[in-house]
Image (cartoon, coloured by chain):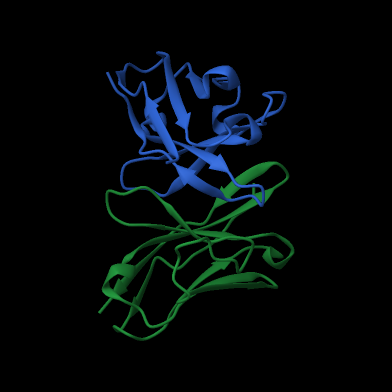
Amino acid sequence: EVQLVESGGNLVQPGGSLSLSCAVSGLPFSNFWMSWVRQAPGKGLEWVATIKEDGSEEHYVDSVKGRFTVSRDNAKNSLYLQMSSLRAEDTAVYYCARDHKEGPWDVWGQGTTVIVSS
Amino acid sequence: SYDLTQPFSVSVALGQAATVTCGGDNIGRKIVHWYQQKPGQVPVLVIYGDYKRPSGIPERFSGSNSGNRATLTISRAQAGDEADYYCHVWDNRSAFFGTGTKVTVL
């Protein structure tokens, strides 16, 4: 069974940092690009970041560039999102998702909640 | 940036067809994917590559893409199809979602 399990979500003050993890099982993790997608309360979906299979390439939405870093450890079948200089507008459920070879995200985790508030 | 515009809501009678549009500049030249998200649940891919259905998605779901509009069609709509639907494209190594459409089955 394919499973993506996010963790690390928490309440954090503006300007603070937080690290999210996504543990992947049931699929050949190192063969796939992986992404983070977020959803603010009551809002639509927003792509955050994507990383290549071997970690050699990363892409980010403009609003998080310079503040967020996506990484992966293929030996541990894990995806990470290091977030710093957090803002209230970063408050959201963060999902990790597998990139299908044709472009969509076909497997999603259950999400982890990040709340940025004082 | 690449803007994708969807109608805020679409209503459809039970058993009839619902059409959800996704407008974007020359979107017909891009590859469009569609997700269904029910309240409190994780998004589910329902159409990828403009018209392909993932395993397990009913044939009632279909997609097309041409010109400045991509379309998701739900034929013979069922109560269980009530959800938010989002289109998604990649453009220059960035991903963009549509604004989302709430489909209500009457």
Q: Position of residue A112 (x, y in %)?
A: 35, 31
Between A116 and A100, which is closer to the camera in this rendering? A100
Figure check: A40 above or below B49: above
Above or below, comparing residue A112 to residue B38 in the picture:
above
Q: Which chain is green?
A: B
Q: Foreground residue, A115 or A54?
A: A54
Residue found 47% across the figure and 16% down from its top? A85
Left or right: where B99 falls relative to A117: right
Q: Looking at the image, is B11 positioned above or below residue B42? A: below
Residue A100 on image: x %, y %: 60, 47
Examine the image and state in which quarter residue A99 appears. top right
Residue B51 location (% of width, % of height)? 60, 69
Query: Which residue is pictured at 50% across the width and 22% down the height?
Result: A80
- Total marks shown come to 0
Residue that protrudes farthest toward the top in the picture: A16
Taking A112 as reference, is A70 left or right? Answer: right
The quadrant the C terminus of chain B occupies is bottom left
Residue at point 63% right, 63% down?
B24
**Rendering colour (chain A):** blue
Residue closer to the observer: B70 or A28: A28
Toward which corner of the image does residue A92 lie, by quadrant? top left
